[in-house]
Amino acid sequence: MMAAGMAAGLGARVRLVERNEKLGKKLYITGKGRCNVTNFCDEGEFISNVVTNSKFLYSAIRAFSPADTVAFLEKYGCKIKVERGRRVFPQSGKASDVTAALFRFLRENGAEIMLNTCCLGVERVQGGFKVATDEGVLFAHKVIICTGGASYPSTGSTGEMFVAIEKLGHAVSPLRPALCPIVLKEKFVGQLAGLTLKNVGLSAFYEGKKVFSGFGEMLFTHDGISGPVALSMSSHINKTELNRITIILDLKPALDEKALYDRINRDFLGAKNNFFKNSLTVLLPKSLIPIIIDLSKIPPQKQANSVTAEERRALARLLKRLEFHPESLADFEEAIVTCGGVDVKQINPSTMESKLVQGLFFAGEVIDFDALTGGFNIQAALSTGYLAGKGAAEE
């Protein structure tokens, strides 16, 4: 929508080919239906939140920044609000307001919209391109491919266009789920399904080397972990051999091991006549206690005042280093974004034009970049769309 509106606004005759019955279908499900459309941060912080090919996005973010997105939305009737972590949402809390603003932009600039129309392929021909659709063949001097990755295929981003892109001569990096739940080998996580842990530390180690460290909220699912910090981790381990990854959960990141040991001593002193199994209620969520008791190897019926100093130290270590092992990542149906796509080395980062095929442009998630949660991925889509539309029309 951004690419089509920009090109039309600069005088190009534009047709936007949309396979769905309405525009912006994926936007409707972002931010739990509220659409976290951007992050109101500076350029440096934005780039630091891009996991794959961050340098490629410098020109795009400079050309159309988060501040530009906010101004754009306000201009086209979508009032915004900034929430925790500088996350930007429509003031109404409705993703449809973002789509409506983009639709007004398209309509005002005169772009023609073809709904319920599937693109079947793009072929280079004399003077431009032949675009095959299920509604007939179109001819165009320029083509901008904005068909997304393979995440949430029910919204239309099935990854089918990568076949046509490769036929045009472009390399496509392998597609992997990103910002997705992590399936764990430990079967006991099923007993914790639905448990949300706030303010925890989560780290990933590849053969002993730390490859991710995060802090925040985590959720146990029926077969693994999800929630913001786990989703971020998935984007940092999805290119590794998962069987060599060890995940460490720190349940008490505000305390070092010595301070946690002292805290356990105080708790046990106050519950000295209680069984060990009843002495952890202040320290841990109820559903987690049986798991910790089992892993600690301390008899549940042992009195708190009989738990030895070494057992208490071991308990403190366990709470600081609860170990998990990934089985797999959730599939594309549960992945917020796709890692992989058109090789950025073959795209001009200032215009989004192909370096291999003149007149061919790319924008959004179809390109091999991905970022963390917080509005960064949608902003990257808008910024690359802005450059692609501008570059195609000016040329």
Image (tube, rainbow, N blue to C red):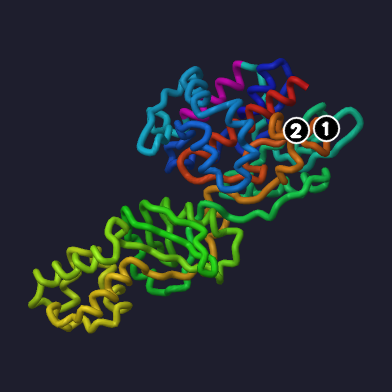
Q: Which residues are magenta?
A: 97-108
Choose between 312 and 37: the one closer to the eye: 312
Q: Quadrant of the N terminus?
A: top right
What amino acid does circle 2 point to? Glu
Q: Which residue is mark 1?
A: 358
Q: Magenta stretch: dominant SS?
A: helix
Is 62 in front, or is 75?
62
Q: Is residue 107 magenta?
A: yes
The answer to which quarter of the image holds residue 361 is top right
How far apart are the two marked residues, 2 and 1, measured between alpha carbons?
Answer: 7 Å
Q: Is residue 179 visible from the viewing direction of this image?
A: yes
| Mark 2 or 1, nearer chain start | 2
Picture quadrant of residue 88? top left
Residue picked out by circle 2: 353
Nearest the viewer among 238 and 37 is 238
| Residue at x 38%, y 64% (from the top left corner) | 249
- On screen, residue 2 above or below 195: above
